[in-house]
Amino acid sequence: MNRKEGMVCCCFLFLTVMIGIKIENYLVDTQPIIKNVPTTRKVVALTFDDGPLDKTTPEILGILREKNIRATFFVLGEQVVRFPMLVQQEIMEGHEVGSHGYDHMNLTRLTAVQVKEQLENTENLISRIAPAPTLFRPPGGNYNDTVLKLARDRGYLVILWSIDTSDWRLHSVGKIVSLASKNIKPGSIILLHDGIYPSATPEALEFIIDNLTRQGYEFVTVSDLLDYYEEKR
Ligand code: NI
């Protein structure tokens, strides 16, 4: 590469990074919470909550590996303490790890100090073994202004979901698959769980992936999904 090409390459890289930062700032400024990402591209994000759990997470990781798909895991601090190796495996296999708080408390019932502790403890536990999380999903999807402010003050994007598979309470593979596919559209964020056992989720996951792949969808992590953000005209 000559000097001129090098300059062009640097500029391109700079612009790409700036556009990335701009989109992220725009999202933080305009959307206190993100449920899906407006886009025309057929991309969706699979997200798994409440893990890691030795009985379910390895099976889910195996399916994702086999299908060559990257997903996002919203982990609980108390589970990170129990199964740190699984968090490391998630990262090593190209997945994203976000925070889901420490022990799945309803954060709207806690004091600001307690919410801060939930965020801080989980962040510290993840950061010891994986990249510091930038995404936060409040347990049960419960949030209020205090929760949002504290999460955003720590630099988090607050991520919910647009497709709820109800896999934590349903044990029918067919039902979970149909709920996952029913209202799917470009930019959807799909809620699943790897922190439950027994669970129909691993079996359902194979069908969900195959179904959506047949419909032309690709699977990306939540952070990658944000890059597909298109401003509505
Ligand atoms: Ni949860």
Image (spheres, rainbow, N blue to C red):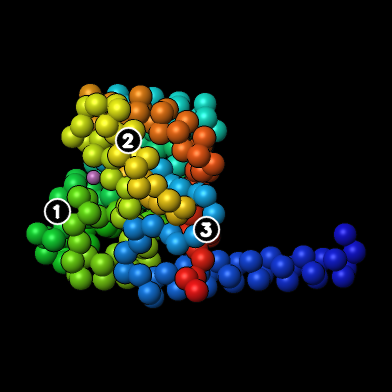
Q: Nearer the viewer, residue 48 or 76?
A: 48
Whether the residues at callouts 3 and 1 have beta carbons within 8 Å, the answer is no
* Residue kind at label 1, given as amino acid type: Asn
* Image position, residue 144 (x, y; %): 18, 66
Q: Is residue 203 left or right of residue 11?
A: left
Q: Nearer the viewer, residue 194 or 75?
A: 194
- Of the two numbered discs 3 and 1 on the same chain, state the one appearing first in sequence: 3
Look at mark 3 in the image and give the residue it sits on.
40
**Is 142 above or below relative to 214?**
below
**Is 215 above or below relative to 8?**
above
Look at mark 2 in the image and give the residue it sits on.
178
Look at mark 1 in the image and give the residue it sits on.
106
* Residue kind at label 3, given as amino acid type: Thr
> Which quadrant holds residue 169?
top left
Q: CA distance from mark 2 to mark 3?
A: 23 Å
Whether the residues at callouts 1 and 2 have beta carbons within 8 Å, the answer is no
Residue 43 visible in this rendered orientation of the protein? yes
Dot 2: within a 10 Å radius of its alpha carbon, few (fewer than 14), some, or many (20 or more) residues? some
* Residue kind at label 2, given as amino acid type: Ser
Closer to the eye: label 3 or 1: 3
Q: Nearer the viewer, residue 91 or 41?
A: 41
- The residue under the point 36% across, 36% down is 84
User: Does the Cβ of the disc 2 residue fall within 8 Å of ligand 1?
Assistant: no
